[in-house]
């Protein structure tokens, strides 16, 4: 069973740039809520606090606690460090990016006194909150004295019942094995029995891979909130996330043992993927205040439906040998499909300590094996079954605190996002920590936050039964500043 899970994991990783798969479903379903500097400073634990624009993306009932209109915007600056340990060799890389954490407007509409039926106010909010940031870069390198990526390709061809002719390779594997064959990195050693070989079947090569990604999910929120007797607050949000993801990877193998490997000098394998999509979801929430010092919050998010996902991809191979260099490029691939991400529920609790501060916490339920891929032109039954077998519901927790000294604020937060994987092939746990400062007067506020995240993964260059994992660790530092005006 463990071997089967490892093979499933490998197949989804290997094909990540050529077909829609379980890894795509997780990437676009796992959300690390960003937003304003105040939201970030509390670690995103705003579900029961309210009166903060970015809470529209988690618990829209927070909109009901506004008692004035507001405009806010918050740019963010992100620096990610990566550390990759492959076959005892450690390599580091980093990437800097700039984005917009939030941009929003809230309109406060006071109730009509005794004729309002207990409703103190109604509020309307709209704007944008960043959900995911895909900017990343990692470099993996190490010596492999056991096999090559080309060994794995040859095994696939040689273990195909009935064998694979060159034309069948071009038809069935146009983006990986076919370019390798056409660049002379694989050759037909026995034409009668259709047996393929490569020049480094037992390794003796330096392997390296750089993966550069960029993009984001920015969600536009259209929300309504209400205050009933200063005790019950409720709200609803229509979310429209815009998804943009780009990945470029550069893989090489270089001869490291001329006594073991002959004729072959090096190979290069480049892959490129662009994904775009627009989704829609609906969120409802409430906050109940049984006493002035405590607030209880709850929110439900429907699955996000991306009805117009489109992938575009291509790849190329270069083989360098003693007698020359050979190149081959894939065709341009594209595919339209649909994606549904999992349902979410968030429970939250906040304690208000007079005018001095607050302590807040929340738990998020999301089961990643509920994600599904669809297409009118292709069946995703195998991929959806893999999603069910591969992922689970982790424990996601966020806590935060804020303290006031006259017009100044100091904030801190912590988050834990459990592993979404059922098996131990990968980890995926994520830890977050945050710190923030703020200044608030009647008609103006400005906030500054530092948000830290760390996660690690076991990344396999190809089949996990053939190659050791690269332990990749990602540490991100994000500085967000938000200014706002009340009126």
Image: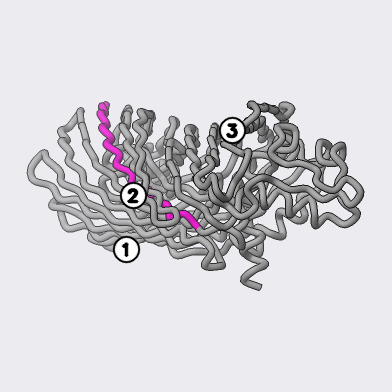
Instruction: Report, in whole angstroms, how far the alpha carbon at label 3 lies from the one at label 1.
Output: 59 Å
Q: Is residue 236 visible?
A: yes
Residue 383 horizontal side relative to residue 237, left or right: right
Relative image position of residue 256 (x, y in whole percent)? 50, 45
Which residue is the site of mark 3? 270
Asked whether residue 345 is drawn in magenta, I would say no
Judge depth for marks 2 and 1 and give the one in front: 2
Mark 3: secondary structure: strand
- Asked whether disc 2 touches disc 1, contact meaning CB atoms under 8 Å apart, the reply is no
Report the front residue among 160 and 75: 160
Which residue is at 52% across, 59% downward?
A: 468
Residues rendered magenta in the picture: 469-487
Dot 2: within a 10 Å radius of its alpha carbon, few (fewer than 14), some, or many (20 or more) residues?
A: some
* Residue indicated by mark 1: 290
Residue 171 in percent (x, y) is at: 84, 37
Which of the marked residues, 3 or 1, is nearer the chain's N terminus?
3
Q: Looking at the rendering, which quadrant does residue 381 occupy?
A: bottom right
Q: Of discs 3 and 2, which sits in the foreground?
A: 3
- Front-lying residue, 108 or 463: 463
Number of the front mark, 3 or 1: 3
- Residue at image location 64% in from the left, 43% down from the top: 305
């Amino acid at each position: 069973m463990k071997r089967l899970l490892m093979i499933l994991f490998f197949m989804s990783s290997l094909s990540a740039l050529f077909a829609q798969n379980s890894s795509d479903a997780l990437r676009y379903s796992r959300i690390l809520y960003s937003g304003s500097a105040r939201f970030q400073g509390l670690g995103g634990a705003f579900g029961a606090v309210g009166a903060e624009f970015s809470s529209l993306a988690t618990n829209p009932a927070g909109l009901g606690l506004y008692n004035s209109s507001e405009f806010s915007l918050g740019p963010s600056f992100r620096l990610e460090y990566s550390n990759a340990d492959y076959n005892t060799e450690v390599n580091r890389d980093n990437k800097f990016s700039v984005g917009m954490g939030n941009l929003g407007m809230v309109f406060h509409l006071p109730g009509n006194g005794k004729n309002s039926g207990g409703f103190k106010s109604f509020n309307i909010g709209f704007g944008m909150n960043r959900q995911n940031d895909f900017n990343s870069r990692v470099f993996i390198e190490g010596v492999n004295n056991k096999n090559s990526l080309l060994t794995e390709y040859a095994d696939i061809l040689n273990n195909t019942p009935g064998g694979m002719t060159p034309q069948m390779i071009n038809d069935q594997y146009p983006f990986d094995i076919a370019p390798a064959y056409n660049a002379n990195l694989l050759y037909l050693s026995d034409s009668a029995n259709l047996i393929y070989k490569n020049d480094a079947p037992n390794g003796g090569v330096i392997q390296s891979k750089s993966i550069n990604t960029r993009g984001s999910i920015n969600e536009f929120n259209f929300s309504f909130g209400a205050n009933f007797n200063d005790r019950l607050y409720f709200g609803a949000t229509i979310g429209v996330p815009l998804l943009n993801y780009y990945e470029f990877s550069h893989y090489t193998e270089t001869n490291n043992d001329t006594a073991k490997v002959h004729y072959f000098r090096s190979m290069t394998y480049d892959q490129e993927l662009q994904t775009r999509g627009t989704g829609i979801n609906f969120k409802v929430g409430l906050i109940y205040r049984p006493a002035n010092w405590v607030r209880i919050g709850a929110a439900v998010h429907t699955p996000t439906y991306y009805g117009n996902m489109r992938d575009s991809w291509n790849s190329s191979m270069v083989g360098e040998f003693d007698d020359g260099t050979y190149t081959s490029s894939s065709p341009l691939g594209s595919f339209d499909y649909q994606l549904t991400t999992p349902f979410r529920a968030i429970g939250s609790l906040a304690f208000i300590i007079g005018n001095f501060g607050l302590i807040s916490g929340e738990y998020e339920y999301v089961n990643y094996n509920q994600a599904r891929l669809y297409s009118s032109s292709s069946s995703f039954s195998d991929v959806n079954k893999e999603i069910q077998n591969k992922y689970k519901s982790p424990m996601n927790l966020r806590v935060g605190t804020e303290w006031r000294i006259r017009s100044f604020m100091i904030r801190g937060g912590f988050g834990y996002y459990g592993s979404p994987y059922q098996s131990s092939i990968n980890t995926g746990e994520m830890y977050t920590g945050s710190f923030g400062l703020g200044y608030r007067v009647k008609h103006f506020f400005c906030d500054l936050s530092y948000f830290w995240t760390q996660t690690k993964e076991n990344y396999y260059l190809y089949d996990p039964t053939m190659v050791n994992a690269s332990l990749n660790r990602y540490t991100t530092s994000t500085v967000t500043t938000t200014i706002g005006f009340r009126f």
